[in-house]
Amino acid sequence: MSSMVLTMYRSRETRLGLILLTVVVFAALAAPVLAPFDPGAVDPNARLLPPGSVHLLGTDSVGRDILSRLIYGGRLSLTVGLLAVLISALFGTFVGCMSGYFGGWLEAVSGWLIDVQLSFPFLLLAIFLLGALGGGTVAVVLVLALGTWVNYARIVRAQVLSIKNLGYVEAAHASGAGVLRIIGVHILPNTLSPICVVASFSMAQAILTEAGLSFLGVGLDPSTPSWGTMLNDGRDYLLSAWWIATMPGIAIGLTVYGVTQLGEGLRELLDPRGRR
Amino acid sequence: MFGFTVGKLLRASTVLLGVSFLAFIIGHASGDPVLLLVRGDATAEQKAELRHSLGLDRPVLAQYVDYLGHALHGDLGVSYRQHVGVAGLIRSRLPNSLELAGAAFAAATLLGFALGVLAALYRDRWIDHVVAALSVLGQVVPGFWLGLMLVLLFAVHWRALPVSGSGGIAYLVLPALTLALPTMGRMARLVRAGMLEALGSDYIRTARAKGLGESEILLRHAAPNASLPLVTQAGLEFGDMVGSAFIIESVFAWPGLGRLTVNAVLQRDFLVVQGCVLVIAVAFVTINLLVDLAYAWIDPRVRAR
């Protein structure tokens, strides 16, 4: 285990990414302790203040502290991303497993569904669905999950196809193991490592997409502090108060960098050929 | 090759059927157009009458078949909000989107290629690090945020370019650059990796050994081989660009298809949304089909799969 961590820690980029990610996650967890102000507290006397000694990253158009909103926003953005990744991983893995193991019409139908979904830009589908459903946190999580289940389904299906004819699976069959046991105990554990890699890249995608949707005004509730809604707020004040739109973008960039580096590190770790 | 082509064509048409049906169902579920059309004090009978005259009281499947039939003849219905034909709306916006996407794509490919070659030639020197930083930046921040930052720098701080809108070439620069940056980064990385691999290979050693000049080795032997992955990437990048164009057109108030779609969604003008989805999906499926066929044509192994 310690040698695995060392492998991941060897690349300078991965090291930097993991440190960044740890800081962001820690800040999100400890938000009530760390945030200097109440993220929703409106202060008419402190409107549009530039970064300074009291409000470290400045204030927005109604005088709310940007740093506090960033910290709480990280909580929401990370939670939304994590939930979306969990749901899509479960669903995608299930579909991939079933279509890979049983084949036949299941495989045909899921393959067609994947083709349909991949034949237009996901963001369009997301805007379209959220416009119809009317935004909100639950809707955003579900739509983001819908956007990435395809990745898991494809990779798990390929894994299952290559594993299911191996000797040890046949041996399990011969010793009388049921289908559920074979899939659950003998096949699924072997698909876990690519799933983890896909999950970290999907997390990055989910955070970026959430920001885009909230920026357009079809995502999370505008009153909740998320990085996307903050960008939306800042857009109208771009000419007079640059810091409102700039800060959330930096927060997104650092987080997404951390998450993608985690993915790169995992990929290197789990793929023996890539190990240096 | 013939069987392969027919198979791909069949697949593409079933996918299009699926997409159009999905668009129709979601559009249908997203709101009642009758409520958009009538005044607040309309009676239930007036609403029912309007619904009947629009054909909205018929079975969904019948309405879908009808819609599809008209769509095949270029008729995408009439916008409930703007009271103009959807096909006309799309036709007036499409050239703008193509202009933006074309400029962005050209910039991304050319710059990405040049930067990738430079990064490989000056490996581990400052220019390599700058190119690497640029491509990371393009991947980790939202594209529209990059756009906002470019506006801050070029339009607000230096006042060199207009903030948003459309008109001359000056209006095209910032949105095209914003749209191009992420793609450019990915292309530069691909070309850099390809160049490094090519420069270390036997045929380059042979070319050197037979006394070719360094520029000829680079341009005629290494670069063409390093740019092959670009062809593969180009098909993928197109989809990515169409996606980010939705937000970037809104940021720069660019009168393209993306902004039309986003506004239509926000106003629940669902026939317009449906029409845009259909047009974009057709473009998407066609391009994927062409890319698939091009592969099969270039690489016979693909046909066998």
Image (cartoon, grey):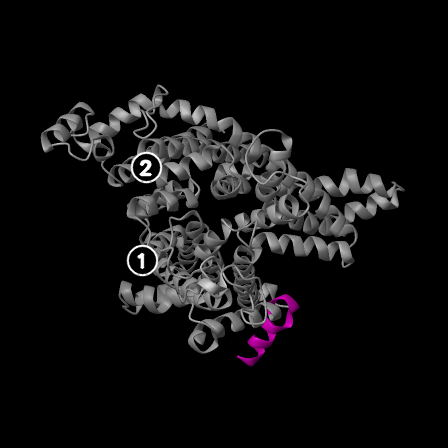
The answer to whether residue A55 is left or right of residue B120 is: left
* Distance CA(mark 2)–CA(mark 1): 22 Å
- Which amino acid type corresponds to the residue marked 2 in the rendered image? Ala
Q: Is residue A80 above or below residue B183?
A: below
In the rendering, at what x and y percent does residue A123 appear? 43, 45
Magenta stretch bounds:
A1-14
Would you call the spot at circle 2 few (<14 residues within 10 Å), some (14-19), or many (20 or more)? many
What residue does disc 1 label?
A138
Disc 2 is placed on an element classified as helix
A155 left or right of B155?
left
Q: Which x, y percent locates residue A76?
A: 40, 64
Residue B148, how many percent across, how many down? 56, 48
* Mark 1 nearby-residue class (10 Å; few <14, some 14–19, many ≥20): few
Residue B23: give its label: 2
**Residue name at image x 41 percent, y 53 percent:** A148
Is A4 a magenta residue?
A: yes
On residue A183, the disc is: none
Q: Chain of mark 1?
A: A
Which numbered mark, 2 or 1, is in the foreground of this view?
A: 1
State the residue in front, B172 or A222: A222
User: Residue furthest toward the right?
Assistant: B211
- Dominant SS of magenta comes to helix
Q: Residue furthest top?
A: B73
On whether residue B224 falls in the magenta region, the answer is no
